Image (cartoon, grey):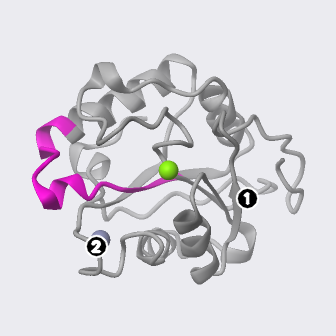
Amino acid sequence: MSLSDAELLGRGTDLIAPASPGAPYDLVFLDRDGTLNEHRPGYVDRPGDLILLPHAVAAVRAFNDAGARVVLVTNQRGIATGVLHEADLLAVQRELVRQLAAGGAHLDAVQLCPHEQATCACRKPAPGLLLTALNRAPWADPAHCVLFGDQDSDLRAARAAGVRGVRVGPAGLAVPSVRGRGSRAL
Ligand SMILES: [Mg+2]
Ligand SMILES: [Zn+2]
């Protein structure tokens, strides 16, 4: 599957296809920087600067294969401040999807906050990115969703949306041990 440019920039509105019956989670929310790819000072604004963390591809693929839907939830305030240009962000997002696809992994949706602090309801730690995705997945139960992120703001956003949050370590997302529905990864 391929995501549209609008989706990659967090403006997608299509419904998210239901998770497979028996999937361990309905939606798996993944932070981007520090969770899937290495943090950089400032913003990742060139595709060549997107360095995936060691287990990211295998982890996303495991969620894909288990039938969960994977939703990227990322703050990119640099758009609001003008430090990050939308065309560059799009190129980086395309590179993320390309690197995942090279390893047989994919994202199902992207929710992205391009706003300045305290000007919106979606910049994490606000829960707006997760709530929007849940609106696009009316079949999903927040109690059967999970978020993986590297910062307090990720975990606070999850909590505010009624979703369990898991903090990843310095190596980022780990490959989950996904079993049946209700089992817990990591
Ligand atoms: Mg992060
Ligand atoms: Zn926002």
The residue shown at (35%, 62%) is 14
Measured as percent of width and height from the top left, residue 126 is found at: 45, 78
x then y, percent, for residue 136: 44, 70
Q: Are marks 2 and 1 in contact (CB under 8 Å)?
A: no
Q: Quadrant of residue 56?
A: top right
Q: Where 41 sits versus 185, above or below?
A: above
Question: Can the viewer see residue 139?
Answer: no
Q: Residue at x 69, y 55 (%)?
A: 167
Residue bounds of the magenta highlight: 71-88
Q: Residue at x 34, y 41 (%)?
A: 3
Residue 20, position as x, y percentages in the image: 70, 53
Query: Dot 2 surroundings within 10 Å: few (below 14), some, or many (20 or more)?
Result: some
Query: Given the image, on which type of amino acid does mark 1 rest?
Result: Tyr
The local secondary structure at tag 2 comes to loop
User: Disc 2 marks which amino acid?
Assistant: Gln
Q: Nearer the viewer, residue 102 or 34?
A: 34
Q: Which mark is residue 134?
A: none
Disc 1 Cβ-to-ligand 1 distance below 8 Å: no
Q: How many marks?
A: 2
Q: Which mark is residue 117?
A: 2
Residue at the spot of label 1: 25
| For residue 76, side relative to residue 146 (left or right) | left
Quadrant where the N terminus is found in the figure: top left
Camera-side residue of 122 and 43: 43
Q: Is residue 53 left or right of residue 179?
A: left
Q: Is residue 23 left or right of residue 75?
A: right
Look at the numbered disc 1 and give the secondary structure of its residue. Answer: loop
Image quadrant where residue 152 sits = bottom right
On screen, 78 above or below 172?
below
The stretch drawn in magenta includes residue 84: yes
Q: Is residue 97 visible?
A: yes
Which image quarter has ligand 2?
Answer: bottom left
